[in-house]
Image (spheres, rainbow, N blue to C red):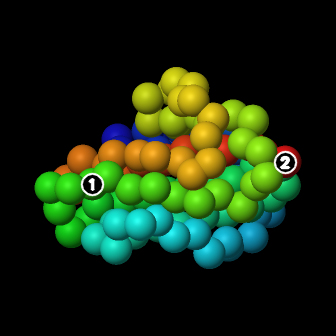
Amino acid sequence: YYHAKAYAQVAPYEDLVVEGEVTDLEGDNPQLTYSALRKAPQLLILVGNYAKTKNGATRIQLPFKKVTSVTDLRENQALKPANPLVLDVPPDDIRLLVVEGK
């Protein structure tokens, strides 16, 4: 069930997953795990709070001069485009986002 749900969330971004390059991405909370795939002009970001830390707040400097859109794939909602990107990741959870920029 959970695998099917995850696949459904990233299916519209299949090209980004298949053809994207692994990109180093860091946030200011070292208790979180950051990973990203980039295929211009998109960036797929996964931030995990696997350590179950209570403070899941983070700021991530994105590799764009201008962020044009941010989409939360799990919630299927648009977030305010910003750089740095400010997120909160609940304990034992993830944030899965697609960011577009220039």
At 33% from the left edge and 46% from the top edge, which residue is drawn? Answer: 88
Q: State left or right for residue 16 relative to residue 70.
A: right
Side (left or right) of 22 relative to 97? right
Considering depth in this image, is 46 or 60 the residue closer to the camera?
Answer: 60
Q: Can residue 15 be seen in this view?
A: no
Camera-side residue of 63 and 8 = 63
Tell me if 16 is positioned left or right of 31 in this view.
right
| CA distance for labels 1 and 2 | 28 Å
Residue at 63%, 35% (x, y): give it. 81
- Residue 66 percent location from the top left of the image: 77, 45
Q: Name the residue under label 2.
A: 102
Circle count? 2
Which residue lies most toward the top here?
77
Residue highlighted by disc 1? 56
Q: Which residue is drawn at 84% across and 55% down?
A: 40
Which amino acid type is shown beneath numbered disc 1? Gly
Q: Residue at x 57, y 29 (%)?
A: 80
Q: What element carries label 2?
A: loop
Nearer-the-camera pick, 52 or 4: 52
Q: Position of residue 37 (x, y in %)?
A: 67, 63
Q: Nearer the viewer, residue 52 or 2?
A: 52
Which disc, if any, is residue 82? none
Disc 2 marks a residue whose amino acid type is: Lys
Point out the tag, 1 or 2, that comes first from the N-terminus. Answer: 1
